[in-house]
């Protein structure tokens, strides 16, 4: 390669290496190693699951073909698929359903037409095509190509010329494997995805900021049963700092509760579902995580007009009390079954009175949010097992295994969570330990778990009436100072508990990870671990809080040396002009 390597810094992550210039020309953030490692783990699980689904489909078709061996019919004719097609073929869930069965979430798709041999269907699934819509340096695409077994072509896009040149340079720098699998293009990701509909098995969106402008084209670019990976880093917007902006971008209004980061995940999922529904498609979340300064969701996309009707059942509005942090969910839709028919109707309302029944304060309303499960626990277990078996291949193994472990213990069917410290702050009382509070909930006959979003968060299927009764019983044993009568805590404590809480230590009060003392929430590995400057912005002294003093001083000295070189060159030219 005809370039001076002295002008570049070699950055190695996993099995990939990239060349970064001292200037802030192409975006790179070391913090996103957690994001990239998690994506690689999910991509490996997706390829394995896809192969299993393909084999199950072939087995089913072989059995059908064995029943009518005299009919030498090609399977592509049965599916009305054209022979010799180079494009990935998809089959909607409606086409794969047996009569009288409900749509399945598992795809009935393959990426290659099976061929018929002696009355049986045979074929192999094609390696998945991956689109990295916003590639920057190309590090993510290179890691996919070099580290994920069984992966096919990886297309890396960017609409910045310098980023594409950097990506192409890095592809060459990573050798023959990268050159054979990764290709880089200068293109607008939205236009490219719209002109390549249903051509990619995996689409990865990791923009600087909000992904909202890419979602409509992204859901069209994924094959049926394929996967969309999406990151949103505009957490201030999603967590309620600018609710009106969130509504304009995502079609949902956020609330500023302790659960705001999980609500951000659910707002993003609801937004993706909304875009998918416009094309008779729907999503099935596999994994949804909040890490560092962003949220990241992994969803599979299917096509089914009938299954799409279930979307209102998966969305809810949230009523948040302004006085005591109690919250309630209002489902948008419901179903009524009669014999074999199902009717879809609006949800019953209201789920809350005009004033909070606990503290007599008003409610704020937010949403709609995705209130169905945000993880598939079977996927989570498989991904965690895979990560543990190949820990040496994940630079951020400690962090992603901790997150996955915590997710594996979450209650999947409980949206949002409570903060024990917030409950105690409302009552102005000392806080019980998490074990004592968990035991009281379990002894009352309910389930409770932690959450990966907040180390102090607790998910439970117990109603708010039960939660406040437990806290009233706790305060009786641990009295508080008298507060003004109009305070939320005073109003709550003025009522006698209906439930008599039992604070005896319950067997399941600690999760398996806690019993084994597995680390679940790790500190940042180094200082200034967070978001970085957008590519192209000049680094100045005001960016020390983001980048660190050493980094900023190094960049400033480099800029000064370049400026001096330009001045000397300009002076020489001026002197030469004067002499002539």
Image (cartoon, rainbow, N blue to C red):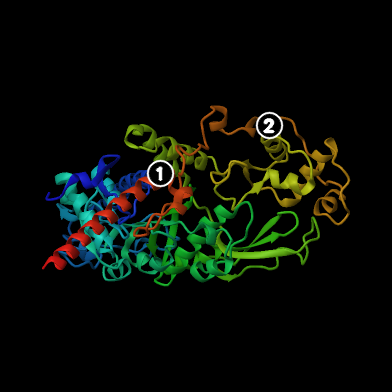
- Residue 384: image location, x then y, percent: 42, 38
What residue do we see at 54% from left, 59% from top? 236
Question: Few, some or many C-alpha atoms within 10 Å of disc 1 (few <14, some 14-19, many ≥20)?
Answer: some
Q: Is residue 359 left or right of residue 529?
A: right
Residue 38 seen in this snapshot: no
To which residue does mark 2 refer?
Answer: 506
What residue do we see at 36% from left, 50% from top? 556
130 and 485: which is toward the camera: 485
178 and 283: which is toward the camera: 178
Q: Is residue 319 left or right of residue 171?
A: right
- Residue 259: image location, x then y, percent: 60, 52
What residue do we see at 43% from left, 47% from top? 547
How far apart in space, not on screen, are marks 2 and 1 (Cα)?
35 Å
Residue 260 seen in this snapshot: yes
What residue do we see at 72% from left, 51% from top? 464
Q: Quadrant of residue 149?
A: top left
Question: Few, some or many C-alpha atoms within 10 Å of disc 2 (few <14, some 14-19, many ≥20)?
Answer: some
Please identify the residue farthest to the front as the structure is shown: 579
Q: Quadrant of residue 194?
A: bottom left
Callout 2: helix, strand or loop? loop
Name the quarter where the C terminus is drawn: bottom left
Residue 429's label in the rendered image is: none
186 in relation to 515, above or below: below
To which residue does mark 1 refer?
Answer: 34
Of labels 2 and 1, the one closer to you: 1
Callout 1: helix, strand or loop? helix
């Amino acid at each position: 390669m005809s370039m001076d390597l002295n002008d570049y810094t070699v950055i190695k992550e996993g099995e990939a290496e990239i060349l970064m210039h001292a200037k802030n020309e192409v975006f790179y953030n070391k913090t996103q190693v957690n994001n990239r490692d998690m994506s690689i783990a999910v991509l490996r699980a997706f390829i394995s699951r896809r192969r299993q689904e393909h084999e199950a489909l072939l087995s089913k078709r072989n059995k059908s073909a064995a029943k009518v061996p005299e009919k030498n019919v090609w399977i592509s004719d049965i599916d009305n698929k054209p022979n010799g097609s180079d494009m990935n073929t998809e089959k909607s869930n409606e086409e794969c359903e047996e009569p009288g069965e409900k749509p399945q979430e598992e795809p009935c798709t393959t990426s290659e037409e099976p061929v018929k041999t002696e009355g049986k269907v045979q074929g192999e699934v094609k390696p998945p095509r991956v689109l990295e819509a916003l590639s920057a340096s190309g590090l993510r695409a290179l890691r996919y190509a070099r580290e994920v077994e069984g992966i096919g072509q990886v297309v890396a896009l960017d609409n910045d010329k310098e980023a594409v040149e950097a990506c192409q340079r890095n592809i060459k720098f990573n050798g023959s494997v990268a050159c054979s699998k990764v290709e880089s293009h200068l293109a607008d990701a939205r236009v490219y995805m719209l002109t390549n509909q249903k051509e990619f098995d995996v689409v990865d969106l990791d923009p600087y900021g909000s992904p909202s402008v890419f979602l409509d084209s992204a859901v069209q670019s994924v094959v049926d049963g394929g996967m969309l990976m999406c990151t949103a880093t505009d957490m201030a917007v999603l967590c309620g700092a600018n609710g009106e902006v969130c509504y304009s971008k995502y079609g949902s209004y956020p609330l500023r509760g302790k659960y705001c980061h999980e609500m951000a995940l659910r707002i993003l999922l609801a937004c993706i579902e909304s875009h998918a529904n416009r094309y008779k498609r729907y999503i099935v979340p596999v994994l949804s995580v909040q890490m560092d300064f962003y949220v990241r969701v992994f969803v599979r996309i299917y096509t089914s007009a009938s299954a799409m009707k279930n979307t209102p059942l998966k969305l809810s509005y949230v009523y948040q009390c302004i006085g005591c942090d109690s919250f309630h969910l209002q489902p948008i839709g419901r179903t009524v079954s009669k014999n074999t028919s199902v009717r879809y109707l609006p949800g019953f309302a209201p789920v809350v009175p005009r004033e909070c029944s606990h503290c007599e304060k008003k409610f704020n309303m937010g949403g709609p949010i995705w209130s169905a499960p945000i993880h598939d626990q079977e996927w989570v277990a498989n991904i965690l097992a895979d990560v543990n078996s190949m820990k040496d291949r994940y630079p951020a193994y400690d962090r992603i295994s901790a997150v996955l472990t915590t997710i594996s213990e979450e209650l999947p069917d409980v949206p949002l969570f409570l903060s024990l410290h917030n409950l105690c702050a409302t009552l102005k009382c000392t806080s019980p330990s998490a074990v004592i509070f968990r035991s009281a909930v379990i002894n009352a006959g309910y389930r409770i778990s932690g959450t990966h979003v907040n180390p102090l968060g607790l998910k439970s299927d117990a109603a708010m009436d039960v939660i406040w009764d437990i806290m009233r019983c706790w305060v009786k044993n641990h009295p508080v100072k008298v507060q003004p009568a109009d305070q939320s805590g005073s109003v709550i404590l003025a009522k006698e508990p209906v439930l008599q809480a039992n604070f005896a230590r319950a067997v399941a009060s600690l999760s398996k990870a806690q019993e084994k003392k597995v680390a679940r929430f790790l500190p940042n590995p180094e200082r200034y671990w967070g978001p970085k400057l957008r590519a192209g912005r000049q680094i100045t002294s005001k960016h020390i809080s983001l980048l660190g003093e050493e980094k900023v001083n190094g960049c400033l000295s480099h800029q000064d040396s370049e400026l001096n070189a330009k001045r000397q060159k300009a002076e020489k030219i001026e002197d030469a002009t004067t002499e002539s």
